[in-house]
Amino acid sequence: MTMGTNNHAQVPPRSRTRSTKRTALMYGIGAVVFGLLFVMQLPGGNSWLAFVAMCVLGIAALWNVAKAIIALRQDG
């Protein structure tokens, strides 16, 4: 270890591999949950409110997939 300008030891930055993979896993699980809820809503979409709920669940699933991909790309 080397000494910094303020006489404190400089430690090398930790690898973000574990935390980014954990983050990607959480977003992936969220995407699966929202995706399953979306699929379960498909047959019952006979009212306007059910259609809006189905759209919100679908968007939430896609949002979580995108966040998981971004988290995995930050790993490299």
Image (tube, rainbow, N blue to C red):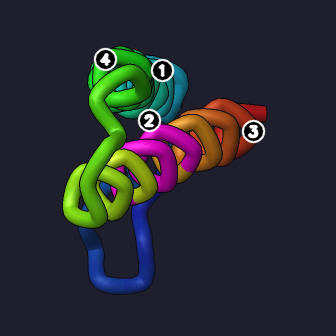
Circle 3 or circle 2, nearest the eye: 3
As drawn, 66 above or below 23:
below
| 51 shown above or below 8 | above
Q: Which marked residue is nearer to the observer: mark 2 or mark 1?
A: 1
Frontmost residue, 23 versus 10: 23
User: How many angstroms separate mark 2 from mark 1 (CA)?
Assistant: 14 Å
Q: Which quadrant of the view contains residue 73?
A: top right
Q: Which mark is residue 40?
A: 4
In this rendering, the answer to whether 27 lies above or below 6 is above
Badges 1 and 3: C-beta atoms under 8 Å apart? Answer: no
Q: Report the Cα–Cα distance between label 4 and label 1.
A: 28 Å
Picture disc at residue 73: 3
Outermost residue to the front: 46
Helix, strand or loop under label 1: helix
**Label located before the other in sequence (3 or 2):** 2
The residue type indicated by label 3 comes to: Arg
Instruction: Pick the quarter of the image with the N terminus.
Output: top left
Q: Is residue 6 left or right of residue 5?
A: left
Q: Amino acid at mark 4?
A: Met
Identify residue for label 2. 14
Q: Of circles 4 and 1, which is in front? A: 4
Give me the C-alpha separation between circle 3 and circle 2: 17 Å
Drawn side of residue 47 relative to residue 36, left or right: left
> What residue span does the magenta drawing correspond to?
56-62
Task: Say which element carries label 3.
Answer: helix
Amino acid tagged 1: Lys
Sequence-wise, which precedes: disc 1 or disc 3? Answer: 1
Question: How much space separates mark 1 and mark 3, taking CA atoms?
Answer: 10 Å
